[in-house]
Each structure stands twice: as structure tokens, then as C-alpha cells.
Amino acid sequence: MAKDRSHLRLVSSPVRQRGGVTIAPHHQPPFPVQGLVLEEDTWFALSSSPKFLEPRRHPIRIMTDAWEAEPALPGSVHIRDRHPFRLLAVVHDLSQDPTWRIEWIEQALRRSLEIARERGLRALGIEPLGTVHGRFPVADFDTLLEEIVREDRAPALDLWRIEPLR
């Protein structure tokens, strides 16, 4: 049974589609974005730098912070940086198998759109959550995104669904 994906399309050149979802490669944004929704895990390991950096704080402070750290809640979204904003969507718990849950992906996606509106953003780039570091099917993410966009009654955002590297 074929699903109607008339408002989703793969583009090979920059195209602007107001209020819809445009699918384009990661290296070819179809329009300027003010925020990126990126996959993250409960301990923020996925976004941590692989480089070893000399600590700027005292080792006792670092150990105390590590001892007192709490994991982020799955489904939550944490804002980092600006220009563009990085919205870290917590959709993985690395202590579970599988590491992702559909309800976490849906919660994080809905919260990301709320945050974008609260901050006055007009355009977002969205990784297909659960597919970059997990095995959630991209087609299922697209279906979920379609449903959320269709249900949404708030002013439209331009959404670029970033085609994952494979």
C-alpha cells in the first residue's frame, strides 16, 4: 500500500517550500536554517567531542560533577549554541536495547517544533531521529513527521528533513 508523500520530496538543488517538509542531502540545505534538530542520548555522549582536551577546571570539580550527574530524560530536548541553534533531541538510552523508542522520538520531535516557535525560528533542519545512531526506519520517521506536521495548527515552519549519510 503506497502512502501519499506529496509534501515530501527529495531535491538535488536548493528549493524553498513554505510550510512543508523538504528532503535534501546534509551538504545541500534547501534554505537557510536557524536551528538543527540532532539525535542525542541521555548522557550526551553522541555530541561529545572525540578529541582529548586539557581540562580547564580542577580535577576534583570534574569528578564531583561526574558523580552528581543525572541522565537527561528520553524525549526531552536540550538547546546548545546559537546561529544555528542546536536542539539536542534525547531519543537514545544507551543502556537499553534497542536504544530508541518511538514515543521518545515523537516527544522530542514535538518539543523541538515547540521550542522553534517559542524562539521565533522560521526554519529547522531535522535529522531523521532514531535513524542516525539507531535502526528506526527512515520511512517510519517520515510518516511520523508527516502526521505531526498535518496535526500542527500553529504557524508554519520551513522544515528540511536532512537526508542521512549512508
Image (tube, rainbow, N blue to C red):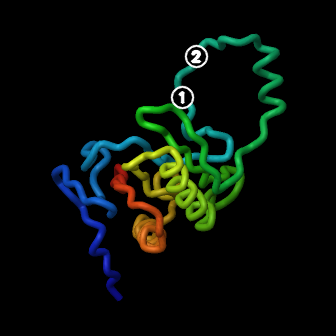
* Label drawn at residue 49: 1
**Which amino acid, mark 2?**
Leu
> At which x and y percent is residue 20?
32, 63
Determine the image quadrant of residue 1: bottom left
Cα distance, mark 2 to mark 1? 9 Å
Nearer to us in this view, 152 or 14: 152
Q: How many marks?
A: 2
Determine the image quadrant of residue 8: bottom left
- Quick check: 133 left or right of 32? right
Residue ranking furthest to the left: 13
Nearer to us in this view, 76 or 101: 76
Q: Classify 10 Å Cα crowding around label 2: few (below 14), some (14-19), many (20 and above).
A: few
Residue at coordinates 71% horizontally, 12% vertically from top-left? 57
Determine the image quadrant of residue 64: top right
> At which x and y percent is residue 16?
23, 55
Residue at coordinates 42% horizontally, 73% vertically from top-left? 150
Query: Eyeballing the image, is 25 above or below 52?
Result: below
Whether tag 2 and tag 1 are in contact, CB under 8 A, the answer is yes
- Quick check: 21 left or right of 105? left
> At which x and y percent is residue 129?
49, 56
Nearer to us in this view, 54 or 141: 141
Q: Classify 10 Å Cα crowding around label 1: few (below 14), some (14-19), many (20 and above).
A: few
Residue at coordinates 44% horizontally, 66% vertically from top-left? 145
* Label drawn at residue 53: 2
Residue at coordinates 34% horizontally, 54% vertically from top-left? 160
**Which amino acid, mark 1?**
Ser
* Label drawn at residue 33: none
> At which x and y percent is residue 88?
55, 44
Look at the numbered disc 1 and give the secondary structure of its residue. loop
